[in-house]
Image (cartoon, grey):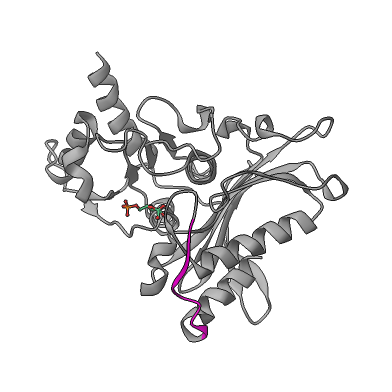
Amino acid sequence: MFWIIACLLWQAGLAKLIGLAGETNVQGEEQKKLDVLSNEVFVKALISSGRTSILVSEEDEEATIVDKSMRGRYCVVFDPLDGSSNIDCGVSIGTIFGIYAIKDDHEPGLDDVLQPGKNMVAAGYCMYGSSCTLVLSTGEGVNGFTLDPSLGEFILTHPNIKIPKRGKIYSVNEGNAKNWDGPTSKYVEKCKYPTDGSSPKSLRYIGSMVADVHRTLLYGGIFLYPGDKKSPNGKLRVLYEVFPMSFLMEQAGGQSFTGTQRSLDLVPKSIHERSPIFLGSYDDVEDIKALYAAAEK
Ligand code: P6P
């Protein structure tokens, strides 16, 4: 699947696949042709695998219940092409996915999907950039694989990834600063003007979650998409963005926080629900958790 998407992306500019498909998805965003194609590739491949019972895609308003004859014991939640608004300018984008095991003694339904992220059995992302990199965890640590196009195989290139305990980078869209709440504003201020004599953190923000999280995982630091006055729940979707990335961060020794609780403890009420997210190096996330705790007092 991932290789097919990578090939579609690498050929897009030539095949004039880039550009709007003229439709909008459930998020009210213009769908690019590659969004539509990627979603079709994943849905068809997951159904034909015979391993899935229910699918949730960022591109589909409703969950897909797999026909009884093709059902398996897994529920897959995914964003087939996250960051697709960056396609035309060649910025790295990616597929994000999470997997739940579900009991097969009943008709699958939303109850099988609306589970806390800590119940996931696997999660990962595939980043389509200068290379095609798959980062995956099945609950026993995090490993990174790079596609060798000459073999058509993913090679283990980043065994047992561990995120540094603290990093020198913060990653947030500062254009939203005027709407931030107190703790987020205070935290970003501390990143820029540290009061403990340490050096200021560097700001790196690509605007493609997979790329920003991949850099955070490898280099350390913190990625923030906070809620704000305009969007109290932020922008990122719980099931197929917040949960998979939080699962990976915890498996790599980092952590993920929503502003009120551990991200993986969230229980979503709907399949496209959003949540604020602060994830990355353990100690960096501890710092912002302390600011939110102090604001509660
Ligand atoms: P903003 C891409 O559309 C996306 O869902 C994530 O990949 C990314 O982190 C975020 O939105 C960027 O949002 O508001 O900063 O452009």
Vertically, is 269 above or below 98?
Answer: above
Location of residue 126 in the rendering, given as x and y in whole percent from the top left corner: 55, 60
Of all residues shown, which one is farthest toward the right?
69
Q: Using the rendered view, name the quadrant where residue 280 is placed.
A: top left
Q: Is residue 189 left or right of residue 74?
A: left
Residue that extends furthest to the top in the rendered view of this protein: 297
Q: Is residue 73 left or right of residue 251?
A: right
For the point 32% across and 33% down, which residue is it?
232
**At 53% from the left edge and 45% from the top edge, which residue is drawn?**
240
Q: Residue at x 68, y 57 (%)?
A: 43
Q: Residue furthest bottom?
A: 14
Figure quadrant of residue 218: bottom left
| Residue name at image x 68 percent, y 75 percent | 152
Reply above or below: 22 against 173.
Answer: below
The number of callouts visible is 0
Q: Position of residue 261 (x, y in %)?
A: 42, 25
Left or right, residue 33 beside residue 140: left
Q: What is the quadrant of the C terminus in the image?
A: top left
Span shown in magenta:
15-24
In the rendered image, residue 23 lying in the magenta stretch gets the answer yes
Magenta-drawn stretch contains 279: no
123 relative to 292, above or below: below
Residue 48: image location, x then y, percent? 79, 58
